[in-house]
Image (cartoon, helix red, strand yellow):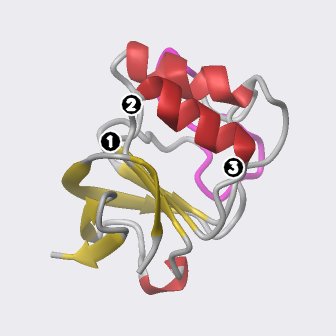
Amino acid sequence: MGRMISPGKVTAEAIVSNEPIGFYGGIDSKTGIVIEKGHPLEGQSVTGKILVFPRGKGSTVGSYVIYGLAKNGVGPVAIVNEETETIVATGVILAGVPCVDKIDISQFKTGDRLMVDAEKGTVEKV
């Protein structure tokens, strides 16, 4: 059982990284494409997917990148973390993106269809 950071319930395809994600300079807020050089998800789109990663990293501007992704219609539909730090928490709350943490992300891989129920703190393969 995880912890709700931002409410909501959604089912979608997962995109999974075992590396932290820095939203500022890491994901293009106009396209939803991961642009961080050398990142395992470089060149892939987070649009319409459940973005699964251990934790955020980098600048506090990352919160506004998460908001920008949502506002531009190119963001993830939910975020699942092992530990949601302040930057990601602020961003998902501002953007209204469901988010759960305290989840063992090693059980998920890119392409899995997941159901996130943030209020219950659950993330399940469906």
Q: Which residues are magenta?
A: 29-42
- Circle 3 residue: 21
The answer to whether residue 36 is left or right of residue 12 is right
- Residue 37 at x, y = what percent? 77, 42
- Residue 111 at x, y = what percent? 31, 66
- Circle 1 residue: 77
Q: What is the crowding at mark 2: few (fewer than 14 residues within 10 Å), some, or many (at least 20)?
A: some
Q: Quadrant of residue 114?
A: bottom left
Q: Are marks 2 and 3 in contact (CB under 8 Å)?
A: no
**Residue at the spot x=68%, y=35% of the render?**
23
The answer to whether residue 10 is left or right of residue 63 is left
- Cα distance, mark 2 to mark 1? 9 Å
Q: Earlier in the sequence, mark 1 or mark 3?
A: 3
Image quadrant containing the C terminus: bottom left
- Circle 2 residue: 96
- Cα distance, mark 1 to mark 3? 16 Å
**Residue at the spot x=70%, y=35% of the render?**
26
Query: Mark 2 or mark 3, which is nearer to you?
Result: 2
**Magenta stretch: residue 124 in it?**
no
Q: Residue furthest right?
A: 58
Q: Amino acid at mark 1?
A: Val
Q: Amino acid at mark 2?
A: Gly
